[in-house]
Image (tube, rainbow, N blue to C red):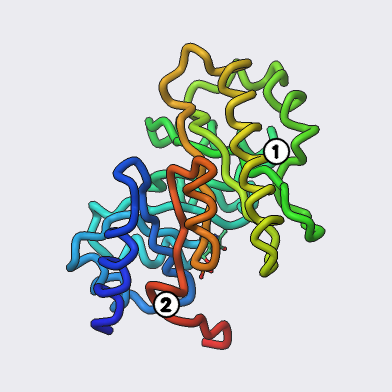
Amino acid sequence: MGHILDAIADIKASLPSHVELIAISKTHPKEYIEEAYSGGQRHFGENKVQELSAKHDALPKDIKWHMIGHLQSNKVKYIAPFVHLIHSIDSIKLLEVIDREAAKNDRVIDCLLQVHVAQEESKFGLKPSELDDFMQNPELTKMHNIRLCGLMAMASNTDDEKQVEAEFHAVGELFKQLKTKYFANSDHFAHISMGMSGDYELAIAQGATMIRIGSTIFGHRNYNL
Ligand SMILES: *Cc1c(COP(=O)(O)O)cnc(C)c1O
């Protein structure tokens, strides 16, 4: 397990100071998280509500928990009391539910819009062409307990670095367009969550402010556990 601390230190040594490392602990036991925590890591990400809630209950309360996976509206209530940032907003309906649950908890929940730029087919994420409609939806102005803080994306799962770079570049451009058009007077819309174990350097070069690293830190995942 000493590997965990070494891996985090190695990644952090190469990170520009404006980039936050989110350790993606999905499928791994809480002991792994405690190990990373002992070295000072505080941002962790999970992709399933049940696992996120269970780990939140069991682990120190100053951990900042990121929800990075697809989120069903009916499960928002379980993470609304504590979640630090939800990366996977892909509908107004989901955002409305988060707003309502955040209000019940007397909080404002920070959220990122997930945008789909990869070549692979995916049900998740807004298409770039859908972003304007999303931002112009009148319901948005009624939501006072959510805060849109930027974009999240995943690149195609390919060895073609040019392809990955082009997709991250597209996300950076979309971020700038949205910032200019809708958030010129907001300091909060400031984040781009992109880059995983295999491609985070390319992501940082294209403007990522948060990288989500799982396997490089914690080793491979065993989904049968
Ligand atoms: C699992 C996951 C990661 C981390 O992937 P690694 O390749 O293990 O670093 C990042 N982002 C999302 C959305 C994930 O589901």
Q: Is residue 48 visible?
A: no
Q: Type of residue at label 2?
A: His
Position of 196 relative to 206 (above/below): below
User: Where residue 95 sits in the image (x, y, percent)?
Assistant: 61, 35
- Residue pictured at 67% horizontal, 69% vertical: 159
User: Residue 24 at x, y = what percent?
Assistant: 44, 64
- The vertical placement of 68 against 37, above or below, is above
Element at label 1: loop
Residue at coordinates 39% horizontally, 62% vertically from top-left? 23
- Ligand 1 within 8 angstroms of badge 1 C-beta: no
- 31 and 196: which one is in front? 196
Between the C-alphas of marks 2 and 1, the distance is 29 Å
Between 102 and 205, the residue placed more toward the observer is: 205
Pointer 2 with pointer 1, Cβ within 8 A: no
- Residue 16's spot in the image, x, y percent? 33, 47
Depicted 33 relative to depicted 151: above or below: below
- Residue type at mark 1? Ser
What residue does disc 1 label?
A: 91
Q: Quadrant of residue 43?
A: bottom left
Quadrant location, ligand no. 1: bottom right
Q: Is residue 16 left or right of residue 34?
A: right
**Would residue 129 appear left or right of 3 to someone viewing this image?**
right
**Residue to which mark 2 is pinned:** 28
**Callout 2 secondary element:** loop
Whichever of callouts 2 and 1 sits on the residue coming sooner in the sequence is 2
